[in-house]
Image (cartoon, helix red, strand yellow):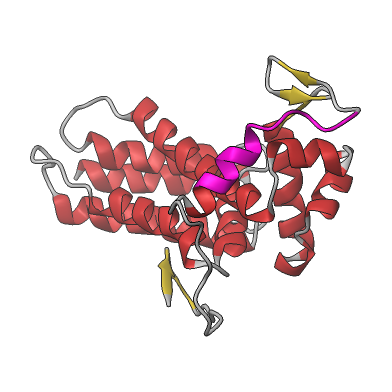
Amino acid sequence: MVEVGHHALNISRAARPRRRRPDGAGRAGETAGMLGRSAPFGELYRPDGTVNGVRKDALLDAAEAVLFEQGTQALTLAAVADRAGVSKGGLLYHFPTKEALVTALVARVIGEFDALIDSFDDGSPGGYSRAYVRATFAILTGEARAHRRWSAITAAATDPELAAPLNEAMARWHGRVREDDPDPLTGAVVRLAAEGLWEVVGHAPDLYDADQLEALQRRLLELLER
């Protein structure tokens, strides 16, 4: 069972052991090696990180859209390439396996949220919890980003190795307590409330309008000032 946010994900694994590379590199080594290969015939790799003008982020956006609209079973490399409007070879240049694609989805969710927290944290007492709230609402009110973590969780749920970075990030985000926090318990309650809101909006994106989200953010920040 893998814990991700408010979910307990039951994951059935095959009874037989997973084969490992003799050098112990495992999936990470295989992915790194495949990513280093030359571009497929007919595909132009560009210095700005694009293949035929398509950036990695656009491919990840396409994968998220497939997941959100059609579910986990529909997430295939062919479906993502079709959604992104690129050849399968162009997609394979960046993401040679579905596991590599899901790993990138998870990494983007974590990296984006870490960067937002850092951008809002002014270092003052209680600043981390305020930054957590503001970062959460920046995502909830952003352009089609509210479902990113939901998509990443859904995609990673079938493999504990893929879900591990999300579990570790969740423990870090909610286990972080600064010595100068004037009220750690209230801070934890507010962060968990923001977490719950993110979870709900991930499943029901149209539940709250912009004014309601603004009011919710204001109330959570007020709780931190009491």
Q: Is there any visible trace of residue 166 in the rendered image?
A: yes
Q: Position of residue 97 (x, y in %)?
A: 68, 51
Q: Is the N terminus in the top left, top right, bottom left or bottom right quadrant?
A: bottom left
Residue depicted at 13% across the width and 48% down the height: 183
Specify whether residue 34 is painted magenta. Answer: yes
Span highlighted in magenta in the image: 29-41
Q: Name the residue furthest bottom.
A: 15
Q: How many marks?
A: 0
Instruction: Say left or right for 155 vs 219.
Output: right
Q: Between residues 181 and 73, which one lies in front from this camera angle? A: 73
Identity of the residue furthest to the front in this view: 22
Residue at image point 20% right, 38% down: 126
Question: Magenta includes 173?
Answer: no
Left or right: residue 113 versus residue 102 is left
User: Is 73 placed above or below 42 here?
Assistant: below
User: Residue at 78% across / 40% down in the picture?
Assistant: 91
